[in-house]
Amino acid sequence: MDKQKTPSPVLRYGRNALIAIIIFAAYAFSWQVTEIDMPRLFTDFYKAIPIIQDFLTPELFARGERTQSYVIDYPVPCDAGEISQTPDSGPRIVATPPCSDPKTNI
C-alpha cells in the first residue's frame, strides 16, 4: 500500500501563488511591450468590423473577386513606337515616364 505524500496546504498555496505571479508578470510585460491603447480600441472599432466579420462567417460576408488585365505599350527606345494614351476615367495604369531608353533604370 503506497500512499503518496501530498504537499502541505501551505506549499500548494505558495506554488499556486508563484505560478499566478509569473503568469501576471508575463501578461503585464506583454501588455506594455505591445503598447495597447484601450480608448483607441473602442473609438476606432469601426475599422475592425470588416475583419471581424470575415473571421466570424467568411462565407456570408466574403467579398467577390474580380480579375482584370491591363495592357500598356511601353516603347523602348522612346522613338521605337507610339506612346500609349491613358484613359481619363476608370481603372488604369499610368506609366511614368511613358517611354525609356535601353540603358535607363526604371
Image (cartoon, rainbow, N blue to C red):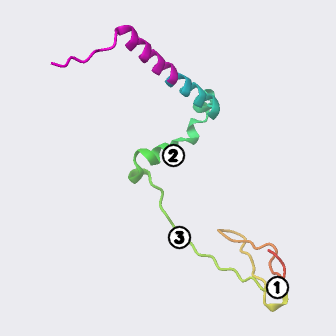
| Residue in the foreground of this view, choosing between 18 and 61 | 18
Magenta stretch, residue numbers: 1-22
Task: Pick whichever of labels 3 and 1 is earlier in the sequence.
Answer: 3
User: Which residue is denoted by mark 3 in the rendering?
Assistant: 67
User: Which residue is denoted by mark 1 in the rendering?
Assistant: 102
Name the residue at 56% across, 38% down: 46
Name the residue at 48% across, 18% down: 18
Q: Is residue 1 left or right of residue 77?
A: left
Q: Is residue 35 left or right of residue 95?
A: left
Residue 65 visible in image: yes
Q: Is residue 78 left or right of residue 56?
A: right
Element marked by disc 1: loop
Work out how far the residue at label 3 is from the one at label 1, CA to CA, in angstroms.
Answer: 32 Å
Q: Is residue 16 magenta?
A: yes
Q: Amino acid at mark 2?
A: Ile
Mark number, residue 80: none
In the image, residue 95 above or below residue 60:
below
Element marked by disc 3: loop
Looking at the figure, which quarter contains the N terminus? top left
Q: Amino acid at mark 3?
A: Thr
Residue 35 visible in image: no
In the image, residue 27 above or below residue 89:
above
Element marked by disc 2: helix
**Magenta region, mostly helix, strand or loop?**
helix
